Amino acid sequence: MNFLALTLFPELFGPFWETGIVGRAVENGIIRGWAIDIRDFAGGRHRVVDDRPYGGGCGMVMQPGPLDKALAEAKSRLPGAAIVLLTPRGRPFSQQMAEVLAGTARDLILICGRYEGIDQRVIDRHVELEISIGDYVLTGGELAAMVVMDAVTRLLPGALGNQASAASDSFSQELLEHAQYTRPSNWQGEEVPQVLLSGHHRQIETWRKSHALATTLLKRPDLLRKRNLDRQEIRLLEDWRLEIERILDAQPLRGLDPSPGGG
Ligand code: 6GU
């Protein structure tokens, strides 16, 4: 799969292509990535790419001309690529979108906006999909483009050493991951949960599922509400409820709670 970023700051992408799992995917020929400098397609001695917005207002708008020329170059290098614009006005990026993009394996041309935005006419002419990575404002789309490429790359066959780890991640199954521990088993007096050292694979799986459910309940109850819980998951959550009730029953709430058993 090929990625081509159109940007005013191509130097931001160098370390991204060279590092970690993405770097290894490049080395193994699973992906290739380039960045094209939009300013190379601007005319004039000063290579200006932006101008003031029609109708007034603050900030500058990226002109259609240089971006259109950069896109022509990008399309000639990657015919058939999907053209994506990174913008806070886009569709919220999700694991599901990453899976669709990785699944079609179509090349991506990623337009990284800067300034207050991009002339709408060049968007209307070329852009197939607008993506936002969340409800906050960045100074430009470069980091968002890297977020999208990173999330897609790790889903491509062979990108992760262990293909199972992509499927059991947070969000693929709409549960947060259980906590992880590694050596030493006693670190500054803090012990690793005993069951993880026991070698009982079924018990370990149950512990992990139970803790994934509890973490999700506490941190992201919205994910738990969306999920179709199976019988085991319901039982594990009921076990947590019993545990909470035991703790609460052991608390003296004298004088606050007139109900039987409350004191
Ligand atoms: Cl894709 N671009 C910018 N500039 N800000 C953002 C964003 C994108 N996604 C969230 N905030």
Image (cartoon, rainbow, N blue to C red):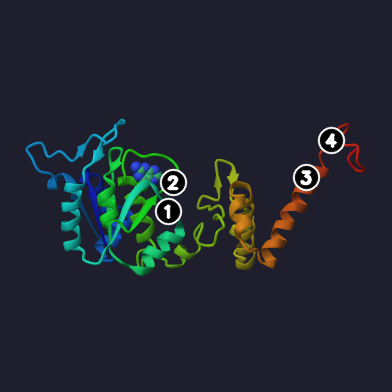
Specify whether 29 is left or right of 151: left
- Discs 1, 3 touching: Cβ within 8 Å: no
Instruction: Residue 52: name its quadrant.
Output: top left
**CB contact under 8 Å: marks 1 and 2:** yes
Q: Residue 247, which numbered label?
A: 3
Q: Position of residue 168 (x, y in %)?
A: 51, 63
Which of the marked residues, 2 or 4, is nearer the chain's N terminus?
A: 2
Q: Quickly name the residue at label 4.
A: 253
Q: Which of marks 2 and 4 is in front?
A: 2
Q: How crowded is mark 4: few (under 14 residues within 10 Å), some or many (20 or more)?
A: few
Would you say residue 44 is visible in this rendering?
yes
Q: For marks 4 and 1, give the one nearer the viewer.
A: 1
Looking at the image, is 11 positioned above or below residue 151? above
- Element type at marker 4? loop
Residue 93, numbered label: 1
* Residue 263, quarter of the rendered image: top right
